[in-house]
Image (cartoon, rainbow, N blue to C red):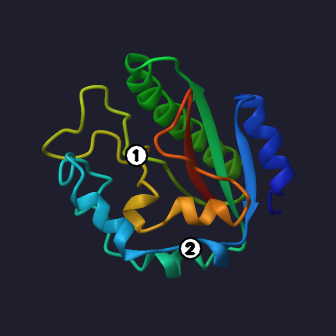
């Protein structure tokens, strides 16, 4: 029995009332090579186990299009100054990541075993950063949307969600749920 979008929304909001979910068509997800190239210019390039060049060499667009259902999950965290921005930036990423893991568990418990999730921004599960030898949390870490080439700004625009840079007062994190 497949879990419905409404059931996922109810579950997600019972875990965090700030979360928003938008049901999207997998064929409307914008993939661009130039987005993946941005990872190369990140100061953390080749230091995170869930970021390029360390992620699996898959055709991510093809993989995403194998799914019938997709949702963008967003979570916002307010801040009022530059110091709070850095804190909100890290916390929002981690909060979204943990919520996605809870949704994955919910799907698994309801006989949906081929789900996948992608986080917004790099994995921040390890407080002191990634181990140089191997990922300390391989079952919990997730790949960022950007690393697989998703242009989240263009994708969200199709659903009347405008992402503005730099953020002002609230930082939003966006993840992708596939089931």
Quadrant containing the N terminus in the rendered view: bottom right
Task: Identify the residue at image location x=43%, y=24%.
Answer: 85
Left or right placement of residue 42 versus residue 83 in this view? left
Task: Identify the residue at image location x=73%, y=39%.
Answer: 12
Mark 1 crowdedness (10 Å alpha carbons): few <14, some 14-19, many ≥20:
many
Residue 153: quarter of image = bottom right
The location of residue 34, given as percent across then percent down, is 35, 71
The location of residue 112, given as percent across then percent down, is 69, 60
Residue that lies at the very extreme toward the left in this rendered image: 132
Quadrant containing the C terminus in the rendered view: bottom right
Residue beneath disc 2? 64
The kind of secondary structure element at disc 1 is loop
Task: Identify the residue at image location x=40%, y=46%.
Answer: 141
The location of residue 35, given as percent across then percent down, is 38, 66
**Vertical arrangement, residue 44 with respect to residue 96, above or below:** below
**Vertical arrangement, residue 91 with respect to residue 12, above or below:** above
Q: Nearer the viewer, residue 124 or 109?
A: 124
Residue 178 shows in the view: no
């Amino acid at each position: 029995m497949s879990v419905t979008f409404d059931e996922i929304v109810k579950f997600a909001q019972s875990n965090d009332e700030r979360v928003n979910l938008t049901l999207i068509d997998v064929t409307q997800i914008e993939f661009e090579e130039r987005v993946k190239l941005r990872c190369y210019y990140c100061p953390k390039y080749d230091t995170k186990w869930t970021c390029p060049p360390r992620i699996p060499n898959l055709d991510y667009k093809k993989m995403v299009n194998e799914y019938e259902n997709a949702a963008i999950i967003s979570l916002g965290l307010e801040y009022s100054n530059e110091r709070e921005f850095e804190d909100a930036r890290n916390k929002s990423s981690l909060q979204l990541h943990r919520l996605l893991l809870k949704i994955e568990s919910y799907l698994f418990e309801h006989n949906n075993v081929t789900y996948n999730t992608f986080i917004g921004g790099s994995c921040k599960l390890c407080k002191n950063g990634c181990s140089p030898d191997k990922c300390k949390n391989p079952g919990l870490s997730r790949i960022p949307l950007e690393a697989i080439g998703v242009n989240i700004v263009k994708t969200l625009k199709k659903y009347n969600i405008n992402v503005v840079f730099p953020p002002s007062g609230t930082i939003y994190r966006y993840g992708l749920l596939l089931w």
